[in-house]
Amino acid sequence: MVFAELFATLAAYGYIGAFVVSALGTASIFLPVPYYAIIFGMGALPAFDPVLLTIFSALGATVGEFVGYAVGYGGRHFLRKKYKKYFAWGEKWFNRNGFLTIAVFAATPLPDDVIGLIAGSVEYKKSKFFLACFIGKLVLTAIIVFAGMYSLRYVMDYLGW
């Protein structure tokens, strides 16, 4: 009964709901918000096209990651002064390998909030940050959506829900 109400609510908000949930879930820094579970559940609903759900969720998650980027950008002067030695090394490394690092962290459950902070603090190009993050989030949300689509019904049947 509870799950039927939850799924009806999720379906009512549609793709915009997936965007907002994903954006809010990734906007929190260092405090995990389980938006994956919601996207997983939405993937099981026949009302959603899995490709569109993946795209909207990945866009929302990418937009949310800019909170970490903005915090890093705002604290860049402090970091440069306090960690001068490490900052120079990190900036050089990140400017060489940043795109791949951002994409890999965004595509996995690794702490991509930290990567957003670093990207902002070294003033990594916003368009490159967006693209790398979107590619990674696209992979991650596709896995979550399709896993929900193909498995949630079986899990619920197994548990007797």
Image: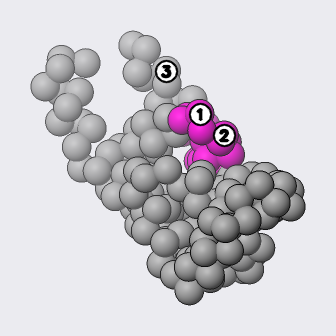
Q: Residues within 10 Å of mark 1 (few under 14, many from 20)?
A: few
Count up the numbered dots: 3
Examine the structure image and report whether residue 25 is included in the region drawn in magenta: yes
Q: Residue at x 49, y 24 (%)?
A: 6
Magenta residue span = 11-33
Tell me: 29 left or right of 98: right
Amino acid at the residue labelled 1:
Leu
* Residue 125 position in % (x across, y down): 74, 80
Report the quarter where the C terminus lies.
top left
Mark 2 near mark 1, Cβ–Cβ under 8 Å?
Answer: yes
> Under tag 3, what secondary structure?
helix
Q: Residue at x 51, y 81 (%)?
A: 97
Residue that label 3 marks? 5
| In the rendered image, the vertical position of residue 91 relative to residue 63, given as above or below | below
Q: From this viewpoint, which residue is outermost toward the front?
A: 85
Q: Residue at x 43, y 36 (%)?
A: 37
| In the rendered image, the vertical position of residue 116 relative to residue 131, given as above or below | above
Amino acid at the residue labelled 3:
Glu
Residue that label 1 marks? 31
Single out the mark in the foreground, 3 or 2. Answer: 2
